[in-house]
Image: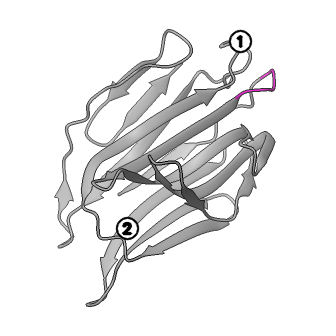
Amino acid sequence: MTATFKVPALPSETGALLYFFSGVQLANNSIVQPVLQYGDNGTFGGNHWTIASWLLNCNGWSFYSEPIIVDPNDTIVASMDKTFDGAVYSWRITTTNSRTGEETTLRVDNLNSPPLNFYGGAFEAYHVADCVKQYPASRSVTFQDITIRTPAGGIIAPVWGQNTPGPCPGLTVLISTTMTTLQY
């Protein structure tokens, strides 16, 4: 699965932890996801945007690649690829800043759990006290050029669902086969 999106403006007030990502949920309760993060998650981050590639499990453990600081309006390319070399199944999760060419990759071997759900675009927010000031001023993020391929290389045309809970009312999700816009 691949998708591209632009880094939104910085929030006008600090304190929140924000994540934007596309991703693949696996049957073993894990998700592979190239992530754009604003805020400090307790391990890395700050009052700036960073990208990193993650494997996160619902049981509380996670692995992530080396974070890279990015700027508003940078274009991010998110890529999640599952491969099989005849002996081992691997996931390669890559998050790339198209402007600078910098990329951060997490490779996970021996993870043969099949894909369960695909997320064209997702937004998670934590520690939000003011939805206007602590969300990006641009008020939306669009994931575009979303492509899901079969192991043989064919393209899957997904039917996206919507789930819009969160700390602030008013999240709107606009979807098509190859694009997801999150308005907040």
Q: Is residue 13 magenta?
A: yes
Q: Return the x and y of residue 75 as percentages of the image width and height.
A: 59, 49
Q: Return the x and y of residue 164 as percentages of the image width and height.
A: 40, 21
Tell me the magenta residue range.
12-16
Q: Return the x and y of residue 79 as percentages of the image width and height.
A: 45, 61
Going 62% across and 64% down the picture, which residue do you hit?
65
Q: Nearer the viewer, residue 157 or 161?
A: 161
Give the amino acid at mark 1: Asp
Q: Secondary structure at mark 2?
A: strand
Which residue has dot 1 on it? Answer: 130
User: Quick check: 132 above or below 100?
Assistant: above
**Left or right: where does residue 169 sit relative to residue 81?**
right
Q: Residues within 10 Å of mark 2 (few under 14, many from 20)?
A: some
Which quadrant holds the C terminus? top right
**Disc number for residue 81:** 2
Going 48% across and 49% down the picture, which residue do you hit?
4
Q: Return the x and y of residue 13 as percentages of the image width and height.
A: 81, 21
Q: Secondary structure at mark 1?
A: loop
User: Quick check: 127 above or below 24?
Assistant: above
**Left or right: where does residue 157 sit relative to residue 105?**
left
